[in-house]
Amino acid sequence: MSDHGGLHPAQPFPAAAREQVVKAQLRANLRKVTTTIRAKRANVVEELPHWEQLRTLGAATKDASLVNLSDRLLQLEQSVRARGGYVHWARDAKEARDLVARIAEGHGVDELIKVKSITSDEIELNRALEERGIHAVETDLAELIVQLSNDRPSHILVPAIHRNRAEIQALFNAELPGEGALSDNPAELAGAARRYLRHKFLTTKMAVSGVNFAVAETGTVCVVESEGNGRMCVTLPEVLVSIMGIEKVLEKVEDISVFMELLPRSSTAERMNPYNSFWTGVTPGDGPQEFHLILLDNGRTNVLADEFGRQTLRCIRCSACLNVCPVYERAGGHAYGSVYPGPIGAILTPQLLGMHDKNANTLPGASSLCGACYDVCPVKINIPQVLIYLRTEANLQKGLTAEALAMKGLKFVMSEGWRFEGALKLARVGQGPLVRGDAIPSLPGMLGGWTQSRDLRPFPKEGFRDWWKGRSQGTGPADVNAAPPETVQKAEDGPIPPQKDEGGKFTADPSREETL
């Protein structure tokens, strides 16, 4: 395990994505779930005429905390301790893992329960605890599925989005004690998980949670969820440890209100989360009697130091950007190699690790830059701009590459008109062996990647510059009004509307070789 834990991609994104996109069942599962969530989210967002104002307020509220983060964290520490809690500071994943393990060992715990926490996945907590003889039981249904199958989460909100119910049926029949004859009925599968987890809730002494928000002025910690497992974990055990990324702190209780509207609509497409748990320190006779808050850095201060990239720390982990991303829908979460997949992972992971990480710095390329992620982000993180910014950083890390040399060459050629014209003439001659009909289907060598999934149009025999010069050399009206090249004429004609055939079906113009 590295100091950064579950962030490190094992391979570059293009290689990982190539392995995932060929999985037909994976793509079908992703398409079904993301399409459903997108539609539901759009409906609940349309109910609020002030949605855009809420987004702006959410972004401003997070920015205000980030600007004064040091003061907010010190105030939070003081507030938690004043109410009977303990506060620990963890510079990296290793320190955070060791803190949790020492607390468990100090109480003689060999098994603990967990609320769904992507921060604990970030530091690879479960594996570290197992190595020290402590078994962590995931209580979120999707996280339990991932754990029982020795798998990895592939979505921030729905970690088992890549699994269908037939796969879950087989898994539960094989792994859950006392089961074995479950059908694939969702209610029956959920009931089996409930029976298994209820015993854990009632017999386990210690729990670990993540944190959605924390309030500096009161020391209040918040977890929002949809199943009730979180409520069980933060109220029943004797000892509660919450691991919080340092960017989650807010100044006042009132600040949470805007996120109670933004988060559920953006994540589960609900008007309100079914379970919203808030606790402040320790209350004698009510809930856990020992509370530990671990404040995790793990690269976040490096992100904060970047004036442009720090907007990434606004993220409230809603996963809305994943559900609209065409790249994520086809490649899935595992292709990103990090616990933070999708568009937000493509900008968060390389910043947390540093752009020198040769696998992580390929993640900013995992985007078509369509902008859908920015449109749905509830705190207005301009993900496309950050992606472009990080791509520049990644190119600087690469140094002088063949691609960089090629771009320098293009800059030189295109900086003077005569050079550009000469290059076009050479290109028309040199393309001869590559042209097949009206297209170049394949380019040689390193250029082959461009034509791997598309045809390239050949250079026309007469380009615009040649045609323009031909016009200016004449003196009569015929020369002045000479027709443009054939390619320009086709563009001026516009698309030819499809025609109905005898069977009433629409057909395209065969000369354009288009299909509808």
Image: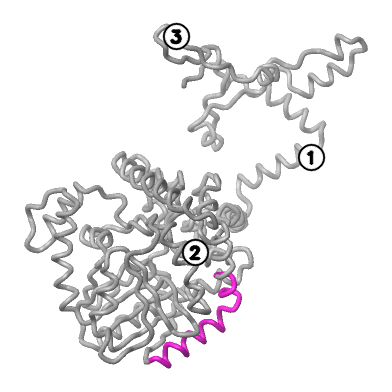
Rendered location of residue 507, percent (x, y):
47, 14
Tell me the crowding category of disc 3: few under 14, some 14 to 19, or many 20 or more residues within 10 angstroms, Cα based.
Answer: few
Between label 3 and label 1, give the one nearer the viewer: 3
Residue pushed farthest top? Answer: 502
Inter-mark Cα distance, 2 to 3: 53 Å
* Identity, as a three-letter code, of the amino acid under mark 2: Cys
Q: Residue at x 31, y 52 (%)?
A: 161
Q: Which mark is residue 315?
A: 2
Q: Can residue 130 be seen in the rendering of this structure? A: no
- Residue 196: x percent and y percent? 14, 66
* Span shown in magenta: 62-83
Crowd around label 1: few <14 · some 14–19 · many ≥20 (10 Å): few
First in sequence: mark 2 vs mark 3:
2
- Which sits in the foreground, 102 or 372? 372
In the image, residue 509 sits, relative to residue 251, either above or below, namely above
Q: How many marks?
A: 3
- State which tag comes first along the sequence, 3 or 1: 1
Amino acid residing under circle 3: Asp
Kindly identify which residue carries mark 1.
Answer: 415
Q: Tell me: residue 343, above or below residue 115.
A: above
Which of the pair 293/397 is nearer the observer? 293
Element carrying mark 2: loop
Crowd class of label 2 (few under 14; some 14 to 19; many from 20; radius 10 Å)? some
Please tell me the numbered disc located at residue 501.
3
Label 1 sits on what residue type?
Ser
The label on residue 328 is none
Residue 512 picture quarter: top right
User: Mark 2 or mark 1, which has the lower sequence index?
Assistant: 2
Give me the C-alpha separation between circle 2 and circle 1: 42 Å
Task: Please say if the residues under marks 2 and 3 sit with CB atoms less than 8 Å apart.
Answer: no
